[in-house]
């Protein structure tokens, strides 16, 4: 088991190394002259040379890469070209909004998706199964931004036109200013993201659980007199969790890198909104910081998923 964990850690480090090489080549080697972006198009040769020296761009490529990796490992992504503020301060100020949105929505989509998936698998072909599948199909059919706009119209604009307010239109409030206001500003983003994502988990849970419930050991458990609830939750769901955790790790890792559409619709100043602004203004250090952060989250979540699989699968612990 210990050797398996070490192999997973080594693989995660390898992925991060390859990601850093790719980002360095993309932005520092093939992406034009950073000194020109900072100094401006009309800068003299002397000014450009000084900027290159300050950035270390006059050093050999391998030294530039080592400096890039060393600084990134210490959380130093340089300074924003536009605001002249350390990149980590910009990103660090946006992470709470993104994490609050993602993890709050995760709890809702798991509750809805798993409940409907189990309901469908326990009642295949019945009206309960058909209703659950219709709900899932509707959820998958709605793009995130469309559902978000519908929620804004139904729960913000319409009540406001009638003289009262149910939910705020946009923005993020820190929990330090009150948990009630924090949650109130995130209810619509939570349910928008959760309803779209829950549809995938409903279908995934239904498909996997139907396969598991047809296995011989499940029939044996039923023959021993176990209740259907114990058969489903103790035996069936344990085998299904392996697939679900894989999907969950990928979803959380990707969304933590920036729920771009969600943050744009609801005006949440998260990592995704920062990335869009940085791309539009060609603020290269901020883009690099966001990409590295997103890659780190994805690799970390996949590593956690691998460790969970080791805990769920006795065969992996003995290899």
Image (spheres, rainbow, N blue to C red):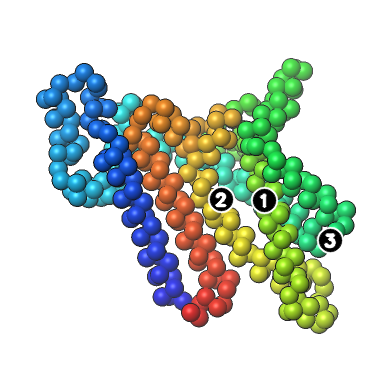
> Would you name the residue on which mark 3 appears?
123
Q: Quadrant of residue 75?
A: top left
> Would you name the residue on which mark 2 appears?
251
Q: Quadrant of residue 57?
A: top left
Disc 1 to disc 3, how far (Cα)? Answer: 19 Å
Q: Residue furthest front?
A: 30
Residue 44 position in % (x across, y down):
15, 21
Q: Are marks 1 and 3 in contact (CB under 8 Å)?
A: no
Task: Please tell me how crowded label 3 is: few (under 14), some (14-19), or many (20+) other residues with Cα within 10 Å.
Answer: some
Task: Please tell me how crowded label 2 is: few (under 14), some (14-19), or many (20+) other residues with Cα within 10 Å.
Answer: some
Disc 2 to disc 1, how far (Cα)? Answer: 11 Å
Q: Quadrant of residue 58?
A: top left
Res. 241 visible in picture: yes
Secondary structure of the residue carrying numbered label 3: loop
Relative to 175, residue 309 above or below: below
Secondary structure of the residue carrying numbered label 1: helix
> Would you name the residue on which mark 1 appears?
200
């Amino acid at each position: 088991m210990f050797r398996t964990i070490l192999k997973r850690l080594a693989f995660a480090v390898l992925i991060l190394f390859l990601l850093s090489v790719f980002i360095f080549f993309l932005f520092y080697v093939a992406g034009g002259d950073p000194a020109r972006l900072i100094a401006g198009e009309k800068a003299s040769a002397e000014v450009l040379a000084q900027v290159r020296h300050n950035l270390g761009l006059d050093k050999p490529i391998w030294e530039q890469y080592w400096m890039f990796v060393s600084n990134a490992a210490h959380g130093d992504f340089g300074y924003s070209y536009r605001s002249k503020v350390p990149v980590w301060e910009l990103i660090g100020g946006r992470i709470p909004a993104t994490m609050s949105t993602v993890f709050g929505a995760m709890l809702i989509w798991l509750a809805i998706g798993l409940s409907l998936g189990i309901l469908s698998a326990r009642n295949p072909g019945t009206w309960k199964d058909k209703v659950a599948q219709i709900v899932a199909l509707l959820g998958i059919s709605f793009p995130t931004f469309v559902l978000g706009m519908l929620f804004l119209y139904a729960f913000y604009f319409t009540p406001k036109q009638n003289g009262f307010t149910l939910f705020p239109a946009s923005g993020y409030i820190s929990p330090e200013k009150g948990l009630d206001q924090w949650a109130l500003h995130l209810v619509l983003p939570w349910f928008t993201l959760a309803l779209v994502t829950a549809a995938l988990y409903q279908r995934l849970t239904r498909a996997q659980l139907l396969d598991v419930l047809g296995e011989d050991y499940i029939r044996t458990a039923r023959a021993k007199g176990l209740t259907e609830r114990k058969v489903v939750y103790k035996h069936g769901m344990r085998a299904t969790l392996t697939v679900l955790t894989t999907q969950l790790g990928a979803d959380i890792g990707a969304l933590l890198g920036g729920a771009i559409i969600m943050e744009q619709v609801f005006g949440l100043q998260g990592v995704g909104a920062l990335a869009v602004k940085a791309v539009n203004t060609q603020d290269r250090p901020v883009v690099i910081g966001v990409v590295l952060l997103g890659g780190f989250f994805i690799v970390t979540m996949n590593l956690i998923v691998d460790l969970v699989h080791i805990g769920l699968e006795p065969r992996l612990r003995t290899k």
